[in-house]
Image: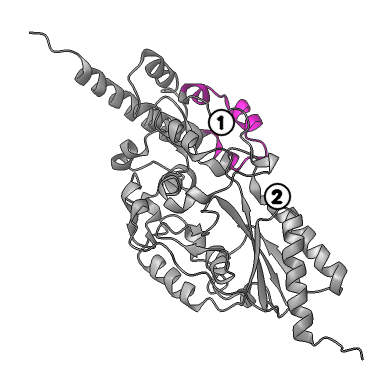
Amino acid sequence: MNITPSPTEDLVALVQRIKQWGEELGFQQIGISDTNLSAAEQHLHHWLDNGFNGELQYMATHGLKRSRPALLQAGTRSIISARMDYLPEPPIVSQQVLDDPTAAFVSRYALGRDYHKLLRNRLQKLADKIAEKIGPFGYRAFVDSAPVLEKAIAEKAGLGWIGKHSNLINRGAGSWFFLGEIYTDLALPSDQAASNHCGQCRACLDICPTQAIVGPYQVDARRCVSYLTIELHGSIPVELRPLLGNRIYGCDDCQLVCPWNRFAKLSVESDFKPRHRLDQATLLELFNWSEAEFLQKTEGSAIRRIGHLRWLRNIAVALGNGQPTPAAKAALTGKSVNDSEMLREHVQWALQNLDTRSRLEQPRQL
């Protein structure tokens, strides 16, 4: 006797297929969540009320769409959450760059091609496979491209837990991965939410160079190196400049120190491999890029969004935090007549910093 599967059994089987297809498409994990993000909504409002968003006004301009998926995409009943590893090199190599004051440190996620298109294309292929199996269905794919609480969704989908540094951590894979989502009108069975395994550890709080992690699970973006070097359009606060060290685009300190990242896997995606020697370039080398070189060498890169002036601003600060070599002073002096008042301000600060260091390092005469 033939027994027709129930709708529930059909959906359970479909989820298993979705996870298999996701793995075939290069995702390391797929999870399913419902749309109830009430706890994350409360956390978001608390964060905004404290002004921790700084100039990130878009975090407050979409009302409840960020925390109530059906308001963003009508009919959403389930969310397919996906993660993809991006770590391009062993963390010890990254730490060596960070420890070299002449080297330019770029957050490891930005060394290769921009991840947005790659992940979005893979999510689209996943949606296409679902449609081939069940026919047309309602969906919309997101990769950091709309008001989506991707980490809270991924946590509910069982991909990991949100750590004290606000990044998602997977017990078997660390935190070096990208996230993407498919909002769908399919009522898919949800996975079990991940449990928190940070325990009493506070390594990320202690290592943060600007002390932007003001408490467990609370990041003040206004102090965060990633915000200061990427999101901030104007002047970097003077009191924070010395704390940036040689970090010119983003910051990975909290991930480099996280004990769970001993389980992180290197990415197999060629698009995430370093381009244009960004993993080993010196500050002077990158400071000498003309605007044309910057645009050419950051084509298809997440770095391009900050523009050439902010790129130079960040490197000027990093040079000012380094050694007072003749080459560093000459490079900064060459940019001191730039048309941008903002850039001139940071160059002048860097030169003053190097002059002060030179005087302090001069041997005393008896």
Determine contact: label 1, label 2, CB under 8 Å: no
Give the number of callouts.
2
Q: Which residue is mark 1?
A: 278
Mark drawn on residue 270: none
Q: Quadrant of residue 1?
A: bottom right
Prevailing secondary structure of the magenta residues: helix
Q: Amino acid at mark 1?
A: Leu
User: The magenta stretch spans which residues?
Assistant: 284-308
Q: Secondary structure at mark 1?
A: loop
* 3 relative position to 163: left or right: right
Q: Residue furthest front?
A: 1
Query: Could you tell which of marks 1 and 2 lies nearer the N-terminus?
Result: 2
Horizontally, is 56 left or right of 28 in the view?
left
Q: Nearer the viewer, residue 318 or 85?
A: 85
Quarter of the image with the C terminus is top left
- Is residue 212 something that shows in the picture? no
Q: How far apart are the alpha carbons under marks 1 and 2?
A: 20 Å
Residue sitting at x 52%, y 66%? 61
Q: Residue at x 34, y 47 (%)?
A: 207
Q: Position of residue 194 (x, y in %)?
A: 52, 69
Q: Secondary structure at mark 2?
A: helix
Q: What residue is at 56 percent from the left and 37 percent from the top?
A: 89
Whether the magenta-drawn stretch holds residue 305 is answered as yes
Q: Residues within 10 Å of mark 1 (few under 14, many from 20)?
A: some
Q: Residue furthest bottom?
A: 1
**Residue corresponding to mark 2:** 117
Rendering quarter of residue 278: top right
Farthest residue toward the right?
1
Q: Amino acid at mark 2?
A: Lys
Determine whether 292 is above or below 115 in the image: above
- In the foreground, 161 or 43: 161
Is residue 156 placed above or below 360 in the rendered structure? below
